[in-house]
Image: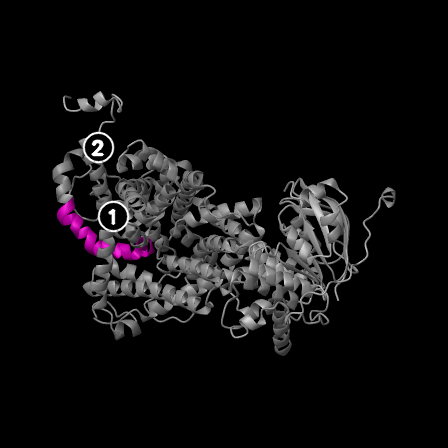
């Protein structure tokens, strides 16, 4: 090292110096950044592909007939999924009716009464339930409802989906209620408001938008479920207004059509998938907007 | 009483001083508007109703176990442990063994992990450590959008878009380059174990990457700074300062993804080929525990047949619970104390 | 008119930790009584025992006798019933964030089942007047949320809310600790006016404030009440050495 002798000569700089970051390390650093960017692109690719195909394949097949008619027999063109759209709504309605109150109640228990061992048990069981495969929930609803009624029904489908909603709603409700400061509860207690009133009119009301978001997440999660409906709602090619009879569902219809060998049905499956996603997204968006408009300025 | 002797503070009320006679005027109190006694009963009823709701969650789990155990009794008595060791699945001769389904479930899930884990960690690392702040929200939102797509839509896309690509391009390429391993041999149908693994991977990436991200953000900033201060490059900082500290949590995230993959039904059923065979090649069709339930449950005519299916459901239930429980514990061990738990 | 408070042998606990030891005190009606002491001395715990707010904390418990007027606090009265007669203002203003100004003030009555619209309007207006807030908010009663007001206004809103239930006693737990001097001045003036109608117990860490607003002052230290006397006496000629040390700024 002939050039740096003036450094040593000055005696101000120590004899050793930290070596510059080697080329290899710099290249690795750059390469790993590149790899990370690449993974993001690879992951986003299918997402865009799925949406692109949904729109591309689906939009051409959605017409008035698709939204107002029942399926036509094999070979006949046309027909639609009107009964499946309505059926899905009925099943989801039943599921929400059963699952939302129970789930919110369990969430209230966890946050307001469950800061103890019993709460921990319920918390753990909720998380476990969240991980149970949906097809297994289907078996349970089959045993609970179908076996008793002796036939498939919208009710059975609703029960299956409700079981899936409850733990999700319970945990998100709990988290949202815990975000409400204790001071707000105390303010109500201080006014001589009873505990149940405080919980419902103050705590729950303050957390409303969060709780509803949680409910919508649970709703969106089960709205596209197919597996638990296979042997509960079962599906139906015709209109059915009896919640005790086999009922069509959009997701079931998509499945049936997708694995069929007919081009016309494939086309309709894409259209159904597009409608399903639009329904889920617009339901979630509608509730979000409703919640936003319901709150006061500055809140 | 002894404290009678102690001089209790006694005082005469001083003359109330008059404050500034401001415009401020305090209205006289009137008689209370709220009269009557408050009943405690509504509070008690409400409290117990909420407890009942909480209990219902536990009851649901009990109900699930009960239904599955009772439903699978017939099959359990007929086959015992052999049920899980036999590969014969024959409704005609009433012989049932779950081995091919277990094999299919395990292989498709493991395959999906092999594909999804590096990608998910890459995405999580990118979002937490490298992404410009403005882009962060968009990238994480879009990744999580993947989780909102219904399984059946994944399946639909897989059948008509992904499988043809696998068949025309990916499988011939794999056969040519890696065919010697025996994992990629046989005719490229498109449909089969490989397709199931790929679609599962796409489906579990959002779960693994979002939990990994959560875990990475919990790694304290000073750990990063400590490594950077030693003159490390950014990648070295990520490797030593971040990933190493978050190891247990990342493993937890992966296992959680595994739990989802094990129980995933529709998309897999639509592309795996549904044949109860154990084949070494990933090109070959297979069958999983979830998809045999999806396909055969409504068609199961005999009692033993139905019972055997329910037993598969029971096994699936226990495996996913064990896997999820393990994963939760591992994620909690890293993020413990993070979520707002205090009620104060 | 307000009522007096008598406390006998009050002990309070958080789980196994004892926070208050044998407190005895008589608070006169229609006077302001200040409680001072270093932080953690138990003065907030004490005031929270008077309306049974202490017991909302898990594992917290109380022993002893408290009478508010003729009402026995820990014997045969429900906490809810009691709190309708004992209003409370907290350290940090805590208006209900999702409610309008009007609804905040009316909350105590509405949530307790009071439905007479006309009387509600009256009470809300009166309470806001009494809390010296009416002029500032009268145009926004239904349009703005309670949380949109400034800190000082929020605290006066909370006072109005407490007054609307028409309590006999008003407990104030460091009501000015989070406020600027001007808002503090307004609230102090308010306390001065309010004590003509209510019995006021105010916890404060600010000795000047105690001297300004209260006729009586109690000094707390380590969960015990060291001295209780006329404010003037406490600040000029305390009988206990520890009180003297505290008020002259030698510790705390």
Query: How is this picture coloured?
Result: one colour
Q: Give the magenta range.
A: B145-170
- Residue C95: in sight, yes or no? no
Is residue B169 one of those drawn in magenta? Answer: yes
Does residue A171 appear left or right of residue B233 in this picture? Answer: right
Q: Are marks 1 and 2 on the same chain?
A: yes
**Distance from label 1 to label 2 (Cα)?**
23 Å
In the foreground, C211 or A290: C211
> What chain does mark 2 sit on?
A
Q: Is residue C141 above or below residue C13?
A: below
Q: Residues within 10 Å of mark 2 (few under 14, many from 20)?
A: some
Residue C115's x, y, as percent?
Answer: 62, 74
In the foreground, C42 or A245: C42
Residue B161's x, y, as percent?
Answer: 19, 55
In the foreground, C251 or B176: C251
> In what quadrant of the picture does the N terminus of chain B appear?
top right
Residue A5's x, y, as percent?
Answer: 18, 22
Q: Which residue is mark 1?
A: A40
Q: Splitting the image into 4 quarters, where does residue B259 fall?
A: top left
- Residue C21: in sight, yes or no? yes
> What chain does mark 1 sit on?
A
- Disc 2 secondary structure class: helix
Q: Is residue B192 above or below residue A248?
A: above
Sequence-earlier tag: 1 or 2: 2
Q: In terms of secondary structure, what is the magenta stretch mainly?
A: helix
**Which callout, 1 or 2, points to the residue nearer the camera?**
2
Residue A284's x, y, as percent?
Answer: 38, 63
Q: Which residue is mark 2?
A: A25
The mark found on residue A288 in the picture is none
Q: Splitting the image into 4 quarters, where does residue B46 fall?
A: bottom right
In the foreground, A276 or B318: A276
């Amino acid at each position: 090292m002939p050039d740096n002798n003036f450094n040593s000569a000055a005696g101000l700089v120590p004899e050793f110096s930290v070596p510059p970051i080697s080329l290899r390390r710099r290249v690795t650093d750059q390469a790993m950044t590149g790899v990370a960017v690449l993974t993001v692109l690879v992951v986003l690719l299918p997402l865009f592909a799925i949406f692109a195909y949904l729109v591309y394949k689906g939009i051409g097949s959605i017409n008035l007939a698709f939204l107002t008619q029942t399926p036509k027999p094999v070979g006949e063109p046309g027909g639609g999924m009107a009964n499946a759209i309505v059926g899905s709504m009925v099943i989801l309605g039943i599921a929400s009716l059963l699952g939302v109150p129970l789930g919110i109640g369990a969430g209230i228990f966890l946050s307001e009464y469950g800061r103890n061992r019993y709460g921990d048990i319920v918390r753990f069981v909720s998380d476990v339930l969240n991980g149970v495969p949906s097809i297994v929930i289907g078996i349970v609803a089959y045993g609970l409802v179908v076996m008793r009624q002796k036939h498939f029904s919208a009710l059975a489908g609703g029960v299956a989906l409700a079981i899936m909603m409850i733990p999700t709603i319970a945990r998100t409700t709990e988290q949202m209620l815990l975000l409400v400061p204790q001071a707000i509860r105390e303010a109500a207690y201080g006014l001589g408001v009873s505990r149940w009133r405080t919980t419902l009119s103050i705590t729950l009301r303050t957390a409303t938008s969060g709780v509803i978001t949680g409910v919508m997440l649970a709703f969106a999660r089960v709205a596209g479920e197919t597996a638990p409906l296979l042997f509960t709602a079962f599906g139906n090619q015709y209109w059915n207004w009896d919640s005790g009879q086999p009922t069509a569902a959009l997701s079931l219809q998509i499945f049936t059509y997708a694995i069929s060998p007919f081009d016309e049905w494939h086309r309709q499956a894409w259209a159904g998938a597009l409608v399903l996603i639009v329904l889920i997204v617009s339901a979630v968006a509608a509730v979000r907007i409703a919640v936003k408009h319901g709150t006061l300025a500055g809140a | 009483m002894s404290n009678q002797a102690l001089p209790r503070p006694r005082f005469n009320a001083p003359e109330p001083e008059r404050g500034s006679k401001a415009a401020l005027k305090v209205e006289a109190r009137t008689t209370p508007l709220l009269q009557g006694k408050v009943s405690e009963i509504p509070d008690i009823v409400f409290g117990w109703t909420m407890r009942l709701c909480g209990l219902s969650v536990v009851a649901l789990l009990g109900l699930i176990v009960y239904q599955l155990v009772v439903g699978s009794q017939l099959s359990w008595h007929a086959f015992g442990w052999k049920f899980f060791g036999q590969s014969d699945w024959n409704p005609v001769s009433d012989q049932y063994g779950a081995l091919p389904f277990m094999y299919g479930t395990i292989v498709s899930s493991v395959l999906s992990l092999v594909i999804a884990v590096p990608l998910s960690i890459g995405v999580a690392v990118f979002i937490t450590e490298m992404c410009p702040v403005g882009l962060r929200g968009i990238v994480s939102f879009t990744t999580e959008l993947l989780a909102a797509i219904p399984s059946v839509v994944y399946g639909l896309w897989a059948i008509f878009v992904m499988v043809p690509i696998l068949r025309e391009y990916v499988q011939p390429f794999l056969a040519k380059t890696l065919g010697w391993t025996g994992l990629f041999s046989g005719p490229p149908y498109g449909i089969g174990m490989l397709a199931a693994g790929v679609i599962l991977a796409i489906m579990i990436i959002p779960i693994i990457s979002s939990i990994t991200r959560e875990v990475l953000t919990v790694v304290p900033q000073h750990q990063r700074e400590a490594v950077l201060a030693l003159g490390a490059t950014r990648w070295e900082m990520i490797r030593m300062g971040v990933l190493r500290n978050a190891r247990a949590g990342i493993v937890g995230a992966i296992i959680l993804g595994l739990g989802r993959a094990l129980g995933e039904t529709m998309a897999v059923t639509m592309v795996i080929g549904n044949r109860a065979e154990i084949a070494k090649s990933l090109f070959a069709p297979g069958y999983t525990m979830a998809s045999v339930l999806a396909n055969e449950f409504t068609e199961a005519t005999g009692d033993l047949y139905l019972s055997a299916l329910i037993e598969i459901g029971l096994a699936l239930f226990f495996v996913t619970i064990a896997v999820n429980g393990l994963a939760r514990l591992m994620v909690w061990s890293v993020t413990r104390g993070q979520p707002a738990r205090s009620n104060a | 008119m307000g009522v007096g408070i008598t406390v006998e042998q009050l002990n309070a606990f958080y789980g196994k930790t004892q926070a208050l030891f044998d407190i005895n005190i008589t608070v006169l009606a229609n006077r302001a009584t200040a409680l001072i002491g270093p932080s953690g001395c138990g003065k907030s715990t004490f005031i929270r025992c008077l309306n049974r707010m202490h017991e909302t904390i898990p594992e917290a418990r109380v022993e002893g006798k408290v009478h508010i007027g003729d009402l026995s606090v820990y014997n045969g009265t429900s906490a809810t019933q009691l709190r309708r007669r004992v209003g409370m203002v907290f350290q940090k203003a805590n208006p209900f964030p999702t409610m309008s100004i009007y609804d905040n003030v009316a909350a105590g009555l509405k949530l307790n089942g009071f439905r007479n619209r006309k009387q509600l309007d009256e009470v809300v207006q009166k309470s806001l007047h009494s809390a010296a807030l009416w002029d500032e908010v009268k145009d926004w009663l239904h349009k703005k949320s309670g949380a949109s007001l400034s800190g000082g206004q929020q605290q006066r809103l909370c006072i109005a809310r407490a007054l609307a239930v028409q309590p006999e006693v008003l407990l104030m737990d460091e009501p000015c600790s989070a406020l600027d001097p001007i808002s503090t001045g307004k609230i102090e003036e308010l306390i001065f006016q309010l004590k003509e109608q209510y019995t006021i117990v105010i916890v404060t860490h600010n000795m000047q404030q105690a001297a300004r607003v209260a006729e009586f002052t109690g000094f707390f230290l380590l969960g015990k009440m060291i001295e209780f006397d006329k404010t003037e006496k406490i600040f000029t000629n305390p009988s206990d050495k520890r009180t003297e040390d505290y008020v002259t700024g030698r510790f705390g």
